[in-house]
Amino acid sequence: MSAVVPEKRSDSSGAAPITHLPASLTELALTIGLDSELLDAARLAHKRPENILGLLLRDLTREEITVMEDRGCRASDWALVQVSQDFDCFRVRRTHFKGRCVLGRFTGDIEVMPGMTLPSGIYDCTLVQCQVANDCLLENVRFAANVIIEREAVLFDIGAITCSGNASFGCGQMLPLSCETGAREVPLWAEATVDGLALAVRDRSDSAGQAALRQAVAHYCQVLASPVSWIRRKSRVRHIQRVRDTYIGPGAVIDNALDLANACVLSSVDEPTVVSGGAAVTDAVLQWGVAVAGQAIIRHSLMLEHSAADEHASIEGSAIGPNTTIAKGEVTATLLGPFVGFHHQSLLIAAFWPEGRGNVAYGAKVGSNHTGRAPDQEIWPGEGTFFGLGCAIRFPTDLSESPYSTIGMGVSTLPQKVRFPFSLITIPAESLSDQDHVIPRAYNELIPAWGLYNNAYGLVRNELKFASRDRARRHVIDYKILRPNIMRLVLDSYMRLRGVKSVKAAYLETDIDGIGKNFVREEVRLTAIEVYGQALTRYALRLLLAQKEGRLTIPGSSEIAQDLADCFLPGSTFEERMRKLIEIEKRNAQLVQDSKQHDDERGARIIPGYQFAHTLAGEDLVVKSAWERVARTSERIAALGIR
């Protein structure tokens, strides 16, 4: 996530306003439980356990009892059944009541599923210690015990929905994020964010902060301990065999799920969470807008807002970030950030990847965390890392300082730390002749800055994709790729590439720090220096333009921009620098267009009629966006009187 402090914002969903990101574990601990609908519900259940719904109640009349018994109802003790003032006894049929039960009024019809309505009421059910609010529909609920059902909720065709009497709804358990053996475990609370979890995983040396965090979550669970399960207003629970110790938030849809146990399903009417299609969710928290379907299995995990699991996905001991979908593959002991594409049969284990925005392609095996001694190894991918088809990544691996890098198809990597942004790690296409005896056979080729010139199209597409697909309301996600923290890594890489002591045909880690278990060719080094330098120049000139317009808001960026501009364009005037910016923007837009045209030309040579089945570069929205940036930049500079 971005290190920039977001402005305070809120929305109509009831989400807590975002004020700032926690700076320390102690500060994070102080936020746990604030503005929590889960704790508010728990406090209400403890405050007035006999009438949690707050209805104006009365006893049943003898006439109402007679009518209900005539329609197949029975009770262990009718004196324990209380109803709202305008209760309609004709709307309750063939139902067995045991213990204290509360019934609201039932009038009119209610939508069971889109386009289908049925009369509200209670039909063919067994209710034990349950409270049912106004205008609900309960039909064919074979056993319900210790459940609060709020207004306009639907329970239809359910085997058993119960509460053990001390439910934690999945909270309080320890998630083994980034290390399967638990060395970086984090206690789970329902409203957790990627930033908070990342802080807890990363900062293990802060023993006082870790203790404060665990104490805060323990207090959270103590307050939460619930004697009832919850079905909140306008939620729909249909065709499921078992629901146990579960909180189901407003507007949620549970439809044809296999199992829902010890779970929290946060939801709102305008951000409904959906569990359907034979999915099983146990010991887990699902946040607002999550979708779980396609027989996916979620265990001991957290699905953050607007994430999804589908097509037999298996997620265990993990936290899945906003706007990320896991399909078909397996994720274990991982903290995964936003916008990760994971749509194939692949493996991701013990990854610390809070920045996300990457891709795990078909057959990628990012899971070599077992040394034969213990499964205690980890991987730290960088933001935007692309794991190619069938690659095999050996642990431990650290790519956190190599954002937007690509692991090529079929590449097998050794344990290593790589520190070059926008790189490609690939199988060597050409031998090094007399250098072959120097380069270990297991080493791959590293091409720093590759993504900036050979995949410029992909970078522009990513920015557009992130902006258009972001539905998160409780996370601030910066869509810009060339941001201060990434450009600092680019500058550091540029300096290390320039700092070689002697020129060679190929370089190893001993020659250039950050290469890892790879090698870099001399011609590749020279190209990377040029490309990194141009990226830094472009970034600096953008900042100088924004400063001139009075729109520069990032602290310290003015000095950085001036230093970079003086380094790469010494002695030039502001006007000359702005003209240079237009030139660089045009060159970058041309790179975007050329990369798309290359695909078009290659496809046309190989596939008959390719040009009629694909959008060509001239009409491509990503290419158009790159040229529109050129036009906008030119207009901004012209507005300053520079021609």
Image (cartoon, rainbow, N blue to C red):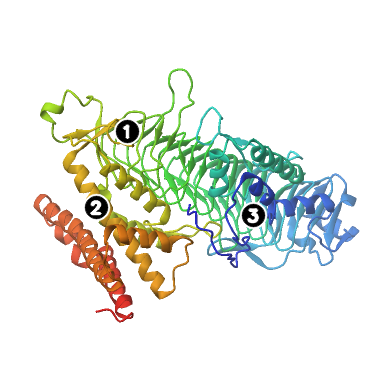
Using the rendered view, name the quadrant where residue 327 is placed: top left
Q: Position of residue 28 (x, y in %)?
A: 64, 48
Residue 143 visible at all:
no
- Within 10 Å of the Cα at label 2, are there few (<14), some (14-19), or many (20+) other Cα atoms? some
Q: Residue at x 30, y 57 (%)?
A: 567
Tell me the residue at 47%/47% (across/down). 337
Which residue, given by chain and number where applicable, does mark 2 sit on? 531
Q: Earlier in the sequence, mark 1 or mark 2?
A: 1
Q: Earlier in the sequence, mark 3 or mark 1?
A: 3
| Residue 575 position (above or below residue 502) | below
Q: Amino acid at mark 2?
A: Val
Disc 3 or 2, which lies upstream in sequence? 3
Tell me the distance, in whole angstroms, between the alpha carbons under discs 1 and 2. Answer: 21 Å
Q: Position of residue 76 (x, y in %)?
A: 85, 44
> Quadrant where the C terminus lies?
bottom left
Q: Is residue 561 above or below residue 283?
A: below
For the point 13% across and 31% down, the residue is 431
Whether tag 1 and tag 2 are in contact, CB under 8 A, the answer is no
Left or right: residue 168 compared with residue 471: right
> Most extreme residue toward the top, as rendered?
373
* Residue under numbered circle 1: 516
Residue at image mark 3: 249
Could you say which is closer to the camera, residue 464 or residue 215? 215
Q: Amino acid at mark 1?
A: Gly
**Residue 579, quarter of picture:** bottom left
